[in-house]
Amino acid sequence: MEPMEAVVLLTYTVLAIFVGFEVVSKVTSKLHTPLMSGANAIHGIILVGAIIVASETTDPWLLTVAIIAVVLATANVVGGFVVTDRMLEMFRSKKPAKSSAPAESATAEVAK
């Protein structure tokens, strides 16, 4: 890879990071769960791609970058599922806790 190509790729990566941050930070909280679900699907595809690249490469530097990509994509997918689960937990109905009042009254009657 020529140095100029590397600079162009680095520029694309930095611009993608800024655009991604701005887009996600402007999303309302009501849309975070669907956004996370879509992001998890995309990161699952990225994870598969990183595993394929890691298995096909013979260059040690490319293998190192591919392994780092596998680790980061895995952390991103797992973190996305954890966040989505927490957000969905907020919308689940809460069942009332079983009261211990009948047990206490039965014990009080036995003590009499």
Image (spheres, rainbow, N blue to C red):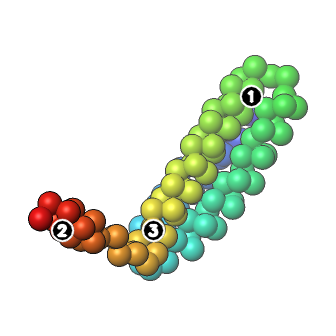
- The residue under label 3 is 89
From the top left corner, tell me how far across and down residue 79 is, in percent: 52, 50
Task: Please report whichever mark, 1 or 2, sits nearer to the chain's N-terminal start.
Answer: 1
Label drawn at residue 62: 1
Residue 39 is left or right of residue 85, and the answer is right
Residue at the location (69% across, 31% down)? 67
Query: How many residues crowd around disc 3 within 10 Å: few (fewer than 14), some, or many (20 or more)?
Result: few
Residue 54 is left or right of residue 25, and the answer is right
Q: Amino acid at mark 3?
A: Glu
Q: Is residue 73 above or below residue 105?
A: above
Considering the image in quadrants, where does the C terminus appear? Answer: bottom left
From the top left corner, tell me how far across and down residue 58 is, in percent: 85, 22
Label 2 vs label 3, nearer the camera: 2
Dot 2 lies on which element? helix
Task: Please report whichever mark, 3 or 1, sits nearer to the chain's N-terminal start.
Answer: 1
Please state which of residues 93 and 77 is positioned toward the viewer in this rendering.
93
- The residue under label 2 is 109
Query: How many residues crowd around disc 1 within 10 Å: few (fewer than 14), some, or many (20 or more)?
Result: some
Label 1 vs label 2, nearer the camera: 2
